[in-house]
Structures are given as structure tokens and as C-alpha cells.
Image (cartoon, rainbow, N blue to C red):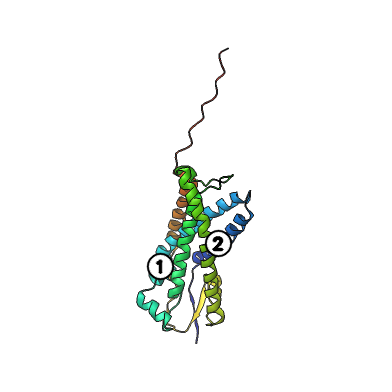
Amino acid sequence: MKHPILLWDLPTRLAHWLLVVLVAGAIVSVKIGGNAMEWHGRIGLAIFGVVVFRIVWGIVGSTYARFAQFLPTPGEFRAYLRGHWRGVGHNPLGALSTVALLSLMAGQALAGAFSNDDIAFYGPLYHAVSSELSTWIAGLHRQTEWLVYGLVALHIGAVMWHTHVKKDNLIRPMITGVKAVDDPAIPPARGGGPVALIVALAIAGFSVWAVSGGLLPPPAAVPAATTPAW
């Protein structure tokens, strides 16, 4: 008999679907180019904020959202590859995929903040580095775009395979938060209360402010022109 448990808390689910929407927006805006690049920059900052929140939430959040709970040991990963792994939440391969995606998204958003397109877009941290370094980072940002596509495609493919081939629906619990499990001894998610949520939001907000250039000194004031005395 199946027993429903709370698997994914609301902050985890909101962070997940926000990332889906924001990454889609980042891809569309960069393909449009032109004036849409301003929106691309704003979306990148939002992605950075959500990723930082999810990383902090992976430390202070509820049971199955925590990295300590789902990051696999080598033994667990081998058991999964042999079909012997039993558990709830992220399976070992999904856990590695999650860490890789979060790391890549954070790196891309941070690189975008230092980048420029030599036309009209300059990231908020452009003036923190030399123009040569900014151009190099911008090139890396563009090249890594294909890695983002690849990891996202693999992630979606793995979810579809688990849902339709292994008959383990991974999408519904990420919407409702609830998953039906066979073992009644498996506990529901606990922890991640209001204080943890405030801490995670505060750290994410500060991070976005810093990457927006909040820690940079204000631009030097341009001296006012004086009228010649003749």
C-alpha cells in the first residue's frame, strides 16, 4: 500500500520552477539580441539570486532538499547503476545533475555580470575588471551556452525516462510536493522553517545586490564645466 509523504517543500518547488522560467527567458532574450539584452542581464541576475537561494536552502532547508541528504556516496552511486538503489528524493544520478546545473547556472550568471558585447551591453561588474578580461569572460560565457543546453536536455530526458519508462513520476511531486512511497517508515520532510527561509532569502538578496555592482565604488563625478572669464 502506498503512503503519501511531503517530499519537496514549497521553497524548493518555487525555486525549481522559477529556474525553469528564467532559463527559458534567458535563452529567448539572448537569441533576440538587441534591446532584449538588457532583459537578458536582468534575468541573469534573477537566476543568480535563485541559485544562491537554492544553495543556502540545500543547507538549512527541509530534509530532502538538503545536499547532505541527497549527495551520493560512491557506494550509493554504484548501487544505483546496478539497479539496487532504493530511496526517495533525488536519486544519485539526479543529485549529480542538480549540483552540475546549479553550479553551471551560477557560473554563467556571474560571468554575464562581467561581460560585454562590444555594442551596447555592459554587465554590472564590467568596470571591476579590465576590458580585455571582460571580453575573454564574455567569450567564455557564449561558449558555455552550449553546455547549458546539453545539461538541460539531459535533465529533461532523464525526468521523462524515469516518468514514462520506470513509471516513477518525478514531475508530480515537484508540483504538489507529495510523493507516494511503499515504505511507511520513510518520514516526511521536516525542517526549513520561517527562520531558515528568511536567512536564505537575505543571503540571496545580498548576493544579487553585490553582483549588481553594489560593492563597487561609485563612479567618479565629472567636474562641471566652467565658463571662461572673458
SS state under label 2: helix
* Residue at image location 45% in from the left, 75% down from the top: 91
Residue 138 lies left or right of residue 71; in this view the side is right
Q: Which mark is residue 67?
A: 1
Q: Residue furthest top?
A: 230
* Quadrant position of the C terminus in the picture: top right
Q: Marks 1 and 2: in contact by CB < 8 Å?
A: no
The kind of residue on which mark 2 rests is Leu
Residue 57 drawn at (x, y percent): 44, 62
* Residue at image location 46% in from the left, 55% down from the top: 204
Residue 13 visible in the shown view: no
Residue 45 drawn at (x, y percent): 52, 53
Vertical relation: 126 (above or below) 29:
above
* Residue at image location 44% in from the left, 68% down from the top: 65
Foreground residue among 90 and 64: 90
Vertical relation: 176 (above or below) 180:
above
Residue 64 drawn at (x, y percent): 44, 71
Vertical relation: 81 (above or below) 230:
below
SS state under label 1: helix
| Residue linked to disc 2 | 18
Picture quadrant of residue 216: top left
Foreground residue among 216 and 158: 158
Residue 217 lies left or right of residue 172; in this view the side is left
Picture quadrant of residue 165: bottom right
The kind of residue on which mark 1 rests is Phe
Q: Which mark is residue 97?
A: none
* Residue at image location 54% in from the left, 25% down from the top: 224
